Image: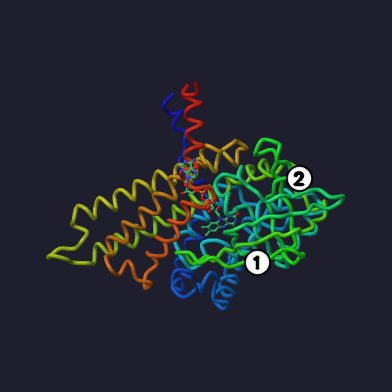
Amino acid sequence: MDQYAAAEMNFELPPELSMLKEQVRRFVDTEMIPVEMRARVGEGMDPDIKASLEEKAKALGLSGYDVPEEYGGQGLGLLAKAVVWSELGRTIALPSRNVEIFGPNVSPLLYLMNAEQKERYLKPTLRGELRWCFAQTEPEAGGDPARIRTSAVREGDTYVINGHKRFITAAGSADYAQVIAVTDRAKAAHGGISTFVVDMKAPGVKLLRQQKLVIDDRPWEILFENVRVPARDLVGKEGDGFRLAQTWLSIGRIRHAARAIGVIERCLEMGARYAGERVTFGAPLAERQSVQFALADSYMDLHQLRLMTYDAALKYDGGRDIRVEAYMSKIFGDAQSFVAADRCLTIHGGIGLTTDLPIEKFWRDQRSMMITEGPNEILKMALARHVLKAYGGNR
Ligand SMILES: Cc1cc2nc3c(=O)[nH]c(=O)nc-3n(C[C@H](O)[C@H](O)[C@H](O)COP(=O)(O)OP(=O)(O)OC[C@H]3O[C@@H](n4cnc5c(N)ncnc54)[C@H](O)[C@@H]3O)c2cc1C
């Protein structure tokens, strides 16, 4: 019986994924970390470094790793993608959002379009001819989509869209936006929301301003004023917006968790090395218990997070609903990677705050990750609903 249990439970990656992990790790160590302090310019990348990394990623066979095979990509499963994302998380060479050296960044929502929409939007996006943005958040509606005010009213064979969006990443360079709007205010919050593809050059679309944040990203505020959208640019059916979003949000959360694995690991590497070198009061920092405990705690977090994330991704690849696992992985990963960056910063003292090292960037980025794609507190609320139901707390 013991032997049987041991054979069924296996926490190691299969050999092909261990090889993939090693391959991406080598790429990160030899090609990305050496250029990471000069690779990014503002919210984008230095064009020469970007082109060189793209070429090397292609030569290694990593291009299109996250694109399904039917669209010419490698169609990796979620566990394999989590392995790639966690290795990439070890470097700040790439922008934290809109990573593009492996081919155009494609929103998972595009794969949910109908065949005709895929021809007009998905395929040109995959060929790098069109760029997109995703517009859900509004001044009155962030984590709570029930408060969305942007409306889409049907008039003949068009919809007329009016609304104000903010925090929209890459809106300034996007050819089209995937806009979340209310089509039926009378319906329960989630049933009355729909998704549209909107041409960013359509009359009535106005880029108001680029927002400045503590991180390098510069998302946009946009206004939609009487924007006419052909009815054929509705994605799915009317009222489908929330359901469609649910099908891919879990993947985004696993991406957060996987990235956090890489951040924690790099912070451990940097923290341990510096603790061994830096001498204060006659002894290296590595001999101080407070420093040892900080490293030990981050190491435990790393192990827990890896197990949680791999478990969730494996279940997803097996066709299971991973909403709960994805909540836990994102909440824990984003929070503990921020703590790991903070601990690493403490170990480095003043130099940790400088832009000579990547630590302050990890620290800023991971703080932002706790807010985007579902703030941790809101995910915890959703997780608590599950816990109360599972353990009889719903009265
Ligand atoms: C860099 C960046 C890029 C972004 N890119 C995009 C994009 O491309 N497209 C897009 O549509 N949006 C984007 N966003 C918006 C992002 O998704 C929202 O900021 C996020 O959903 C939170 O919404 P909010 O800021 O309005 O906070 P709110 O929802 O107003 O919440 C405010 C605070 O209250 C807490 N809170 C809320 N409800 C509860 C509750 N029930 N219990 C306990 N605490 C609660 C939250 O945790 C949060 O800290 C981006 C944001 C940033 C910072």
- Tag of residue 161: none
- Tag of residue 236: 2
> How many circles with numbers are drawn on the protein?
2
Q: Answer with left or right where residue 210 lies relative to residue 123.
A: left
Residue at figure coordinates x 62%, y 37% from the top left: 319
Label 1, secondary structure: give it.
strand
Examine the image and state in which quarter residue 352 appears: bottom left
Mark 2 Cα-neighbour bin, 10 Å: few <14, some 14–19, many ≥20: some
Colour scheme in the image? rainbow
Q: Is residue 273 above or below residue 50?
A: above
Label 2, secondary structure: give it.
loop
Q: Is residue 257 above or below residue 381?
A: below
In the image, 135 versus 223, the foreground residue is 223
* Residue 251 image offset from top left, x and y in percent: 58, 47
Circle 1 or circle 2, nearest the eye: 1
Residue at figure coordinates x 57%, y 50% from the top left: 140
Could you tell me the amino acid type at mark 1? Leu
Can you say which quadrant of the picture contains the N terminus? Answer: top left
The residue tagged 1 is: 207
* Residue 147 image offset from top left, x and y in percent: 60, 45
Outermost residue on the right side: it is 156
Could you tell me the amino acid type at mark 2? Gly
* Residue 375 image offset from top left, x and y in percent: 49, 48
In the image, 29 versus 171, the foreground residue is 171
Examine the image and state in which quarter residue 126 appears: bottom right
Q: Is residue 382 above or below residue 341?
A: above
Q: Classify mark 1 as within 8 Å of ligand 1 or not, answering yes or no.
A: no
Comes first in the chain, label 1 or label 2: 1
In the image, 259 versus 186, the foreground residue is 186
* Residue 266 image offset from top left, x and y in percent: 39, 60
